[in-house]
Image (cartoon, rainbow, N blue to C red):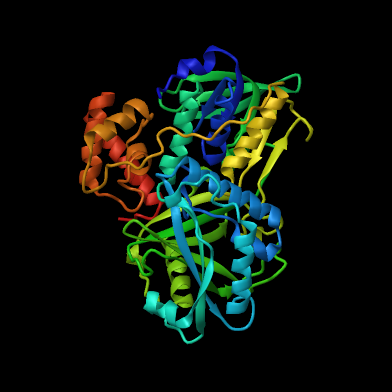
Amino acid sequence: MKRDIKALSASQFDLLIIGAGIHGVAAAWAAARRGLSVALIEKEDFGGATSANSLKVIHGGLRYLQHLNIRRMRESISARARFLRMAPELVVPRSFLMPTFGTGTRSKLVMKIAMGMNDIISADRNNGVRADRRLPNCYVISRGELFKNLPQLDRPEFTGAAVWHDGFAENTDRLNLAFVLTAANAGAVVANYVRAEKLVVENRIATGVEAVDALSGAQITIRARQIINAAGPWFHTVKPELQRTWVKAYNLIVRKKWFGEFGLALESASDFHDPDAVVQRGKRNLFFVPWRDGTMIGTQYRFFPDDPDKRGITADEIAEFVREVNLMYPALDLKNEDVTLVHIGIMPALPGAAANAQPDKHSDIIDHEKAGGPRGLISIKGVKYTTGLSVGEDAAMLASEKLGRTWRELADELTGAEMPKTTKEKIVADEIVHAVRDEMACKLADVILRRTALGSFEFPGDAVLKSCADIMGRELGWDGKKIDAEIEDTRRIYRMHGLFS
């Protein structure tokens, strides 16, 4: 996969996709494999914004039972099965546990019914999934079994726990990149660090975009017969009149690992009203998901009226999140210094709920020809990583139909869907060179945060940054000044994500 800026302006594409989060890369993957000429551009690095903020759970929509929304649940179940089939090295089964208590919606009886309904609704969840990636049935355990497995949950009100199973993608960055690599192998022209600045509209028809190569400053025009706007919170860059409200979604990454290999759902201390739910729980869940040497905790939301380029986290926001965790479960004894990093994403807000900072729950594909123009433009409002695959694919199918092309059913396949070997303890120079030569790593942060497992859990240290920068510098011809600039820029990104030293 080579970065070829000239190829972006050399000819007219069938389809231009703006934004390489999970929705955009899935659209490129689906369209290129069906023979469309595709261009995919991203203003930063592939999957480096909202798609990088995820609890990494490829979930089957169990929570939609409280909404009685079986259709959405089935969409999630289908998407989860596809990920388990197509990326078995990256997506694996993970068990989740939710304590039961009382006589209401969290009682053992109600949870047993819910787990049974989930098994029935997802009866085909393992179709085509290889044996070691299949998800077992749900079940409910007794109080004694709960405390035997997790003695730290010894609270008098707990009567047992419900246990269910979902997919878990330890490295969503590699998963996202696998869609890009597969699209490129199928003929798509892909480029990171290309910023779309203006939609080109002629006679009420979208014919392309004016863009800038952020690495060279070169101005380019990319022409296409259909355009998909998958730019997420940069949505307005392509269509300024499309006003949205946004929430900042963030997850704490902490060094502590309390619950073994179980993911855990615990009720927050504050009251919560879900406007979509038929059955109200009165509280919302925070999830504790074991990951690498610690735990991800999430998700917290705040109203976000700012420029998405200014996304970041403050020490006060981290401290507030830590206080909430300790208020809901004091035995965890979480401290600010336990937080290694904060993953941050900007999501569409639930309409009318900005004051409550609730994220929208419904993805949408907007055909601008039907919504008042211009013709040739499709926009994606995406809200979930799990269904990003199917939503992106549906947008590509709509574009294909508008081009008069027949949409063929194809078997799912991915290139490059394997775990990286480079870690903080073992820097594999060949892997970094491969990331530069064949995976379009252009900046030090691309390697540290996304092509390898070096730095998405915690800041790997200046010595690691220097070692990797030297390897990249030899490949890319960086001088000492450029190497120092790349190290400082990578530190800046870490400061944005909670590294304040």
Name the residue located 42 percent from the left edge and 67 percent from the top edge. Answer: 319
The reply to whether residue 313 is in sight is no
Task: List the single residue furthest toward the bottom.
Answer: 156
Decide if residue 478 is on the left or right side of residue 362: left
Q: Position of residue 214 (x, y in %)?
A: 45, 28
Q: Is residue 272 left or right of residue 47?
A: right
Q: Is residue 164 above or below residue 191?
A: below
Q: Residue at x 44, y 23 (%)?
A: 217
Judge by depth and name the residue closer to the eye, 72 or 77.
Answer: 77
Q: Is residue 396 above or below residue 273?
A: above
> Could you say which is closer to the camera, residue 500 or residue 288?
288
- Image quarter in which the N terminus is found: top left
Residue found at x 40% / y 52%: 497
The quadrant of the image that shows the C terminus is bottom left
Is 333 placed left or right of 17 in the picture? left
The quadrant holding residue 109 is: bottom right
- Can you name the residue that lies furthest to the top here? 10
Q: Report if residue 208 is visible in the image.
A: yes
Point out residue 43 in the picture as x, y percentages from the top left corner. 49, 33
The answer to whether residue 135 is above or below residue 6 is below
Percent across and percent down for residue 182 are: 47, 29
